[in-house]
Amino acid sequence: MPDGSEFDGTQLLTLVRSGNSPFDGTWDVNLLIREIEENLGDQVIDIPTVYKGYNNYGFHLKLSNRPDVVARLARGDVNMPNYDGFPFHEQVTEVKFEVSVYELLRSEPKILASRLLYYRIPVQHVGPRLEIPQNIAGRRLLVFERAEGENNVWYNVNPEQEASLLAQYAHIRASLFNFNLPPEFTTLWLRERLFEPKPESFPVPVAPTHEFCIALFTSKIEATIKDLGETIGLEDNKSIVGPIAAAAKQSILRLIPHIMPSENDQTSLYRLVLDHYDFGFHNMSVTMDAHGQPLVTSLYDWETGCIVPAILSDPVLVVSVDLVTDENAGPSVTRVPEDGTLEDWEQYMMWSRVYFKALFDQAPDYERVIKAGKDARHLWFALREWRGDNPEGFFGGLGDWAERRMKELGVD
């Protein structure tokens, strides 16, 4: 705030009109208001609350003649001097993908995707960035119809309400897993939404088949571990492919065809599914029904979503810990506080059992693909979690694992 105190996120419109905007000197809130009014054809009469996320601000706006909306505006402006946020081209792709997801899921009420009303991709100005922008064109903007309720309610519910929420989360997750994606959507977005480094293309068309899944893995390994002496890792990483990583690459490539189940009924294993990839209580709105029970009203923030064969789908649920499965689809947890007690662990495991029982009851194929794809999932998730450091050590370990699995599987 102008007096040096911290903005509490309330009554922004009153502050702006009195010349006390907490955003003064960085960007003009009036520009946001004007853009929303012009594109929704209504007048903003109040901004009760502002939320600050890691990458975006969220503005709860009241309008004069239509339901409340939420505007999600990027905190980073691509035209700021010394801008060091997500690259411009990545932001454009993320916005376009997210818009496509909201449009696609509008016909699937069980997933509860928020209703998108308006969006705009960021605009990057040509030339040097020497001054703080006087507009908000460099910030991506999405405006949604505001669902009833609030997010982050998990910490404020009792055990009975926790169980109700876990069942609802499982229902949404099962609906998402069971949702059949149009072929044109998967063809357009699967490669684009892969984690880095991405292959430039696939040797076969994108399809829900055993053949394509092998091609996907092979292309991903080739893009990640190039030839001996070439660079490896992140763009600013100076590492090169050494002899250990190069040897590991060959071991992994030999293993890939042998860890892809080739059962007669491959539909459930290789059908292409949409993963939210940040599925948790922090990205859902929840209200209380007439009986005092929590009711999930929307799922949002699809900007990190991806498309994968079912065998690679990740059912993780983020609550105060991450509810995950082990390689045999048994309930487990990760990201547990270091000071957690035995009683805490028992509670976390109870949450995981409740969630995955409900999930697998509603999507029994999910449990089957996790069990059938344990080796493929081990390799895929290891690649996904690698952050570019120590390529010789990391891929050396993965290569050793590949060699052990080939011996166990009787691969010559």
Image (cartoon, rainbow, N blue to C red):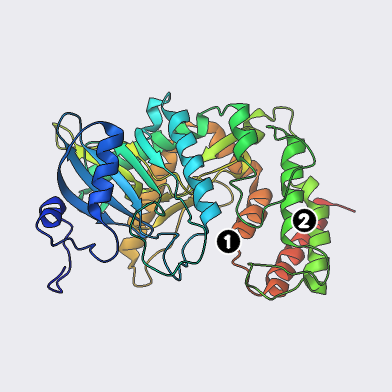
* Point 17% across, 60% down: residue: 21
Q: Quadrant location of the C terminus? A: bottom right
The answer to whether 171 is drawn above or below residue 343 in the figure is above
Amino acid type shown at disc 2: Glu
Q: Residue furthest top?
A: 107
Mark 2: few, some, or many residues within 10 Å (few <14, many ≥20)? some
Q: Residue furthest right?
A: 412
Q: Nearer the viewer, residue 278 or 76?
A: 76
Q: Earlier in the sequence, mark 2 or mark 1?
A: 2
Callouts 2 and 1 close, C-beta under 8 Å: no
The answer to whether 106 is drawn above or below residue 324 in the figure is above
* Point 66% across, 75% down: residue: 390
What numbered label is drawn on residue 127? none
Alpha carbon distance from label 2 to label 1: 17 Å
The spot of residue 199 in percent (x, y) is 71, 51
Q: Which residue is mark 2?
A: 222
Q: Is residue 344 left or right of residue 370?
A: left
* Point 73% across, 56% down: residue: 223
Q: Quadrant location of the N terminus? A: bottom left
Amino acid type shown at disc 1: Glu
What numbered label is drawn on residue 385? 1
Q: Is residue 174 left or right of residue 351?
A: right
Mark 1 residue element: helix
- Residue mark closest to the camera, 2 vs 1: 2
Mark 1: few, some, or many residues within 10 Å (few <14, many ≥20)? few
The spot of residue 13 in percent (x, y) is 14, 51
